[in-house]
Image (cartoon, rainbow, N blue to C red):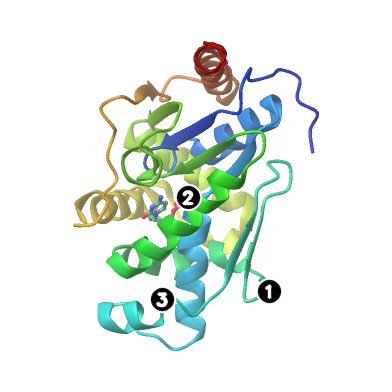
Amino acid sequence: METAARTAPAAVIVAIDGPAGTGKSSTSKAVAGKLGLGYLDTGAQYRAITWWMLNNGIDVNDATAVADAAAKPVIVSGTDPAAPTITVDGLDAAGPIRTQEVTAAVSAVSAVPEVRALITDLQRSIAAEAPNGIVVEGRDIGITVLPDADLKVFLTASPEARAARRSGELKGKDPQQATDLAATREALIKRDAADSGRKTSPLAKADDAVEVDTTELTLEQVIECVVTLIEGAGAEKAGRVAR
Ligand code: DC
């Protein structure tokens, strides 16, 4: 794990939400590494349960079948920001959860209330057990999962910037998925609409979240901005604890 070059003065709980392609994962991992905090990718958990459904022949568009099976897989997340891990029933799922098949199915599975209830409980227990604080990234962290987080950040970016970043990421991982920009943009917009429009815990900005538009910022600038916000939240928390 990267040695913490800077410190958050108290064990802070940080919620980072926003749509795909805003730099959430890269930012969250980097700030957690710099500040010695744990890191949890909640999208990976929804992808992991989706992967299990696909592997076990569950029709992901049948909400009742998904709900009935939701408690079966055992999902374990490792929270070291330098090497985050995810397993399903003991199997390494880090690679398979990034396939196009899983990406196409994850919005349907993550819209099922029973799935969200189980994964939300898992996320809360991981955050509660993080000894030095944690950065939790997702879509509904600030509003639903950790409404008492010490800091809430909501990352945004234009659809063009998000598609360009996502397309770059995909090229690095799976050349077959390196579709053209327009197709990536379409897919992102479709997934955002599903994630923002679902009934249970839609993607949304908490009233007390700090919004950071990353369209014109480099990753380093976003990281620096969020580190500064966390240091401020940590100092405030340390002050409250001392009083
Ligand atoms: O961050 P990601 O693209 O890997 O997330 C995959 C999907 O999981 C996303 O389309 C919506 C869902 N998700 C969610 O519903 N709630 C979260 N807290 C995180 C992700």
Of labels 2 and 3, earlier in sequence is 3
Specify the label residue 90 is tagged with.
1
**Residue 157 to residue 42: above or below:** above
Tell me which amino acid carries mark 1: Gly
Indicate left or right for 33 with 143 as reference.
right
Indicate left or right for 42 with 59 as reference.
right
Q: Residue 132: horizontal and vertical position, in percent?
A: 66, 33
Q: Residue 165: horizontal and vertical position, in percent?
A: 49, 39
238 or 67, which lies in front? 238
Of labels 1 and 2, earlier in sequence is 1
Crowdedness near tag 3: few (<14), some (14–19) or many (≥20) residues, C-alpha within 10 Å: many
* Circle 1 SS class: loop
* Circle 2 SS class: helix
Question: How far apart are labels 1 and 3 at the CA level?
Answer: 17 Å
Q: Residue at x 63, y 17 (%)?
A: 9
90 or 58, which lies in front? 90
Question: According to the image, label 3 marks what residue?
Answer: 70
Q: Residue 28: horizontal and vertical position, in percent?
A: 56, 35
Of labels 1 and 3, earlier in sequence is 3
Q: Residue at x 57, y 73 (%)?
A: 74
**Residue 26 to residue 98: above or below:** above
Crowdedness near tag 2: few (<14), some (14–19) or many (≥20) residues, C-alpha within 10 Å: some
Q: Residue 83: horizontal and vertical position, in percent?
A: 73, 48
Residues at discs 1 and 2 in contact (Cβ within 8 Å)? no
